[in-house]
Amino acid sequence: MRVLVTGTRSKLGAAIVQALSGSHDVRTLDLVAPENGSASSLIGDPRNRDLAAEATSDCEAIVHLAPLVDLSEPPHEVLDAATRGTYNLITTAVAAKRFVVISTLRFFEAYPMEWRVNEQWAPRPTTAVEDLAPYLAECTVREVSRVMPLKGIALRLGEVVDDTDIRGRPASPGWLHINDAVQAVQCALAYEETGPRTWEPRIQHPTNGWSVFHIVGAGTRTRFPLGQAGQTAFGYRPTRDLTDGAARAMSESPRTAPRRFTGQPGATGRRVVIYGAGGPLAAVTTEALARDHQLRLTDVRPLDEIIAENKPQSPGAPFPRLLEPPHESRVVDVTDPDQVVEAARGMDTIVNCTVVRPHSVMAFRVNTVGAYNVMRAAVECGIRRVVHTGPQMVTMHFPPGYWYEFGLPDDVPPRPGANLYALSKYLGLEICRIFAEEYDLEVPTLLFSSFVNPSEPAPEPLGVFPFSISWEDAGEAMRQAVRVPDLPRPLELFHIVADLPHRKFSNDKAKRLLGWQPRDRLASHWLRAFGE
């Protein structure tokens, strides 16, 4: 089997290559040449999509030590590599049957040691980039593997060490010997799901899907117990017990992150910064807020230049206008963390309307890394209320999606699949959630799909899309998200959709928590003319 291994300059990557070379045709990819590089080595960054396609060409399996970047790089570069680099590798791997992403058990450190935490427990990564990067790489592989004909496998490893690393150091329950880590990779490459149980209907197992395995050392005093990886199907059998003499601290209750917010409470301030103010959703939001809020409008281009260009997104779409003082406008690139922070200083609320859809580079830099920059700015500037926006991620037609379901609530898990726009926005949403939970922020997240101008003729041959809203009602929902006194959870998802008769998507949560009521039923877009 031809196997691509990335990140081979690391100690673990080199050990994986050495172990696999005897039985597989191994190709490697790294940022710089390994000390003993071979003809099969490729050098470069998988954020270059052409290089990613070359690296994965004809490979039946990929073992990805994400992120493929120097962790000393700025956080926004590390996250871009973890997301865009991983996305390029998995979506160009047309011959691959499996994609193994190497991740970490650090996601579970918030759980007490005496809890039997295994693969069935939810990850709880912190906002530290060394947690976010592998977590977002995991999310990328998981979502893409729902729709591509390959199996995604995450190996969450303990702290990988070799004999030299541990010599003279106190034992640690979190250590994992490098030989056992390599064994886990070999298990992942050979892994086949077990057949159906006798009480299940006989079905053909799919060629795609997602599996997670926690890889711990041997012994009974490991930080986390051996779970699914130790079952017969996967067949992992750790051989090195590195816990002899390790302290085993027990706790009586879960360790949760302290509430750290000390800044301005949400909904009480009137100074609002809007990122992406040149777009139509931000334009209608501006009109909804300008009468009683002080706005700082920012975009990557000067607003007067956007206005002079006079190119609405679609017929009847709102268009920005310059406001008189005390409102102001600035040029801000959301991919530049310093510019984002400076634009947030002195503000009470952040509204993030930035978006890039089809561009394979900027989609991740704006939709994913831009969200990270905005949340970092909120924490640094003591801003509790951040109104985040994005596309709905529940209308995917493929089997993992929800297209044929009805009455879908806001909190159904997103299903972005491999769609560049949806996936990059989904990863940004996960960043917002993690920041909101760690820092006790208030992040109402409004998800949209089709915007309709009720005065425009109905061009849709199949009638209005069942996840549609008028521009004016969208702006009012944004205003309510800025003004709502409080929210039950740090991040709340809201599907912003009109009261349509399709009954596919519910807007009850937005009505209940935001106090929002859509006015436009868009009837002319779904009623038939007599005799049609």
Image (cartoon, rainbow, N blue to C red):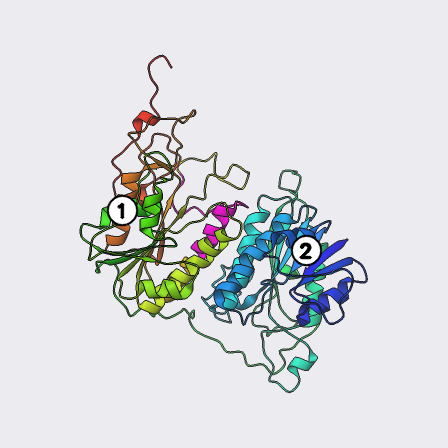
Q: Is residue 327 found left or right of 117 in the rendered image? A: left
Furthest-top residue in this view: 531
Residue situated in front as seen by the camera: 440 or 291: 291
Q: Is residue 511 found left or right of 360 in the rendered image? A: left
Which residue is labeled 2 in the image?
62
* Percent x, y of residue 291: 18, 50
Q: Quadrant of the C terminus?
A: top left
Q: Is residue 529 above or below residue 271?
A: above
Do the residues under discs 1 and 2 have CB atoms within 8 angstroms?
no
Which residue is labeled 1 in the image?
321
Residue situated in front as seen by the camera: 245 or 25: 25
Amino acid type, callout 1: Arg
Secondary element at image label 2: strand
Asked if the stretch drawn in magenta spans residue 438, the answer is no
Q: Does residue 88 appear in this view?
A: yes
Q: Which residue does the image show at 64% across and 57% down from the upper left? A: 100
Furthest-right residue in this view: 22
Magenta-drawn segment: 408-431
Circle 1 or circle 2, nearest the eye: 1
Q: Count residues near mark 2 (Cα–Cα under 10 Å), then give few for <14, some for 14-19, many for 20+.
A: many
Q: Count residues near mark 1 (Cα–Cα under 10 Å), then give few for <14, some for 14-19, many for 20+.
A: some
